[in-house]
Image: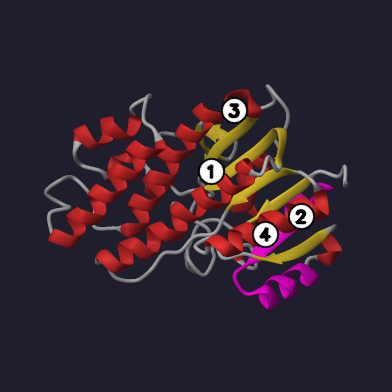
């Protein structure tokens, strides 16, 4: 099996994910670039060939079979990986219960599904890194109800408790009471709040076995961020790559929300 450091980046055929792949490859990691459309993944990987070792694979984070197929491929081809970057994400137009469900399916549950399958298969090497690409839009300040904030920050919060909170949000959107209960009218913001909370839960579960962090890349000039955003793709990716490079016990933070390598407010 390969002894090279191997990084897997979800949803990485364009934008920040693609630049994360480029920077990791330039840092001498073997990178597996993934996308729902395998042809687009192959095209993006070929375009990055000059940066280093970039391969491609198909992955739909919302499809259980697709997630399982990727993990089986990684197991057969490499044996183990060192880094998982959960970059796949959506910011959908509109706001209703269907938009909420679709957003959570990718931004939260997709990241959970990929991570859990990687861990279940014992694919991540001890001391590896798991990075959730989050957003400053997911700071707890977007939730107006202090009791909700406390529940999300509770040190004993479990993934089951987090799922219950998220389902409460979905139900409140469905019956039109979400604002009265303290939730914002933004599926994207809540999905990133929940992803940050999952980061803390997972870091607690794994302890010293891995460094687990959420990273805000800042407001980046991508299709999602828009042309007027303040940061280049290169700048935004740099903090993700920094967190992905904290390999080995005691080499970096865990359970943190980071921007540019520094902890920021949840």
Q: Is residue 80 left or right of residue 134?
A: right
**What residue sits 82% from the left and 55% below the top?**
77
Q: Secondary structure at mark 3?
A: loop
Q: Which residue is mark 3?
A: 253
Q: Which residue is mark 1?
A: 215
Q: Earlier in the sequence, mark 4 or mark 3?
A: 4
Q: Secondary structure at mark 4?
A: helix
Q: Secondary structure at mark 2?
A: strand
Quadrant for the C terminus in the image: top left
Find the distance from the CA under tag 2 to the CA under tag 4: 14 Å
In magenta, the rendered stretch is 22-47
Instruction: Please state which of the two labelled residues, at mark 1 or mark 4, is closer to the viewer.
Output: 4
Across and down, in percent, residue 48 comes to: 78, 66
Across and down, in percent, residue 38 comes to: 68, 73
Q: Secondary structure at mark 1?
A: strand
Find the distance from the CA under tag 1 to the CA under tag 3: 12 Å
């Amino acid at each position: 099996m390969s002894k090279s450091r191997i990084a897997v980046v979800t949803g990485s055929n364009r934008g920040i994910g693609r630049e994360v792949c480029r920077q990791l490859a330039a840092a001498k990691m073997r990178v597996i670039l993934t996308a729902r459309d395998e042809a687009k993944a192959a095209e993006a990987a070929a375009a990055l060939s000059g940066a280093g070792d970039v391969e491609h694979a198909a992955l739909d984070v919302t499809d259980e079979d697709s997630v399982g197929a990727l993990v089986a491929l990684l197991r057969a081809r490499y044996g183990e990986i060192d880094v998982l970057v959960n970059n796949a994400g959506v910011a959908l137009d509109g706001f209703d219960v269907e938009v909420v469900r679709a957003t959570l399916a990718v931004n939260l549950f997709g990241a959970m599904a990929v991570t859990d399958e990687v861990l279940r298969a014992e694919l991540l090497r001890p001391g590896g890194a798991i990075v959730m690409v989050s957003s400053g839009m997911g700071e707890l300040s977007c939730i107006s109800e202090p009791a909700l904030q406390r529940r999300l920050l509770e040190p004993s919060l479990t993934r089951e408790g987090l799922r219950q909170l998220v389902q409460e949000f979905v139900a409140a959107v469905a019956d039109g009471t979400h604002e009265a209960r303290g939730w914002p009218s933004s599926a994207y913001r809540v999905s990133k709040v929940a992803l940050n909370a999952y980061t803390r839960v997972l870091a607690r579960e794994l302890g010293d076995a891995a460094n687990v962090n959420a990273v805000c890349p800042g407001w980046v000039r991508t299709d999602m961020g828009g042309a007027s955003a303040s940061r280049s793709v290169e700048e935004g990716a740099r903090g993700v790559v920094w967190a992905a490079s904290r390999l080995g016990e005691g080499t970096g933070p865990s359970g943190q929300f980071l921007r540019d390598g520094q902890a920021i407010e949840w």
